[in-house]
Image (tube, rainbow, N blue to C red):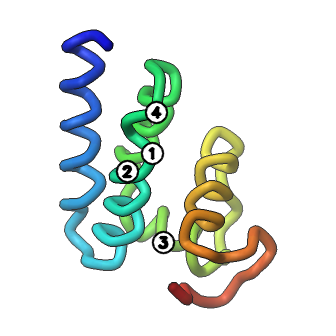
Amino acid sequence: MTDDLQMRRRRAAYRASHRGTKEMDFVLGRYAEAHLAGMDEADMADFENFLAQPDPVITEWFALGSAPVEPEFAALIAALREFHGLSHDEAGGLTI
């Protein structure tokens, strides 16, 4: 593992767990804790791009199901939902 990738993982872990809303801190921080170590550079780039999205948008994609998920983030949203025990078709609330 390169030092650059390790630094990016640490930065992503911090960004995932210090979002500005406690709900997203929990959702993204726990996921990052469990998955960052296994991410390669391409996965890290995708996750970093995802973390750049505003919390209200991520919340709509993840919990509310009221906004269509951008195709580039669909797999990550599905993985987040599965990680937190939500079905991919479920909409209407965050039940953890």
Give the quarter of the image for residue 79.
Answer: bottom right
Q: Residues within 10 Å of mark 1 (few under 14, many from 20)?
A: few
> Which numbered disc, 4 or 2, marks the residue that appears first in the sequence?
2
Quadrant location of the N terminus? top left
Q: Are marks 4 and 2 in contact (CB under 8 Å)?
A: no
Towards the viewer: 25 or 32: 32
3D distance between C-alphas at marks 1 and 3: 20 Å
Q: Secondary structure at mark 2?
A: helix
Residue found at x 44% / y 19%: 41
Q: Which mark is residue 32?
A: 2
Q: Are marks 3 and 2 in contact (CB under 8 Å)?
A: no
3D distance between C-alphas at marks 4 and 1: 6 Å
Q: Residues within 10 Å of mark 3 (few under 14, many from 20)?
A: some
Q: Are marks 4 and 1 in contact (CB under 8 Å)?
A: yes
Q: Secondary structure at mark 3?
A: helix
> Which numbered disc, 1 or 3, marks the residue that appears first in the sequence?
1
> Which numbered disc, 3 or 4, marks the residue that appears first in the sequence?
4
3D distance between C-alphas at marks 3 and 2: 16 Å
Q: Residues within 10 Å of mark 2 (few under 14, many from 20)?
A: many
Q: Amino acid at mark 4?
A: Gly
Residue behind mark 3: 59
Q: Are marks 2 and 1 in contact (CB under 8 Å)?
A: yes
Farthest residue in the right direction? 89
> Which numbered disc, 3 or 2, marks the residue that appears first in the sequence?
2
Residue found at x 56% / y 60%: 80
Residue behind mark 1: 35
Q: Amino acid at mark 3?
A: Thr
Residue behind mark 4: 38
Towards the viewer: 32 or 19: 32
3D distance between C-alphas at marks 4 and 2: 10 Å
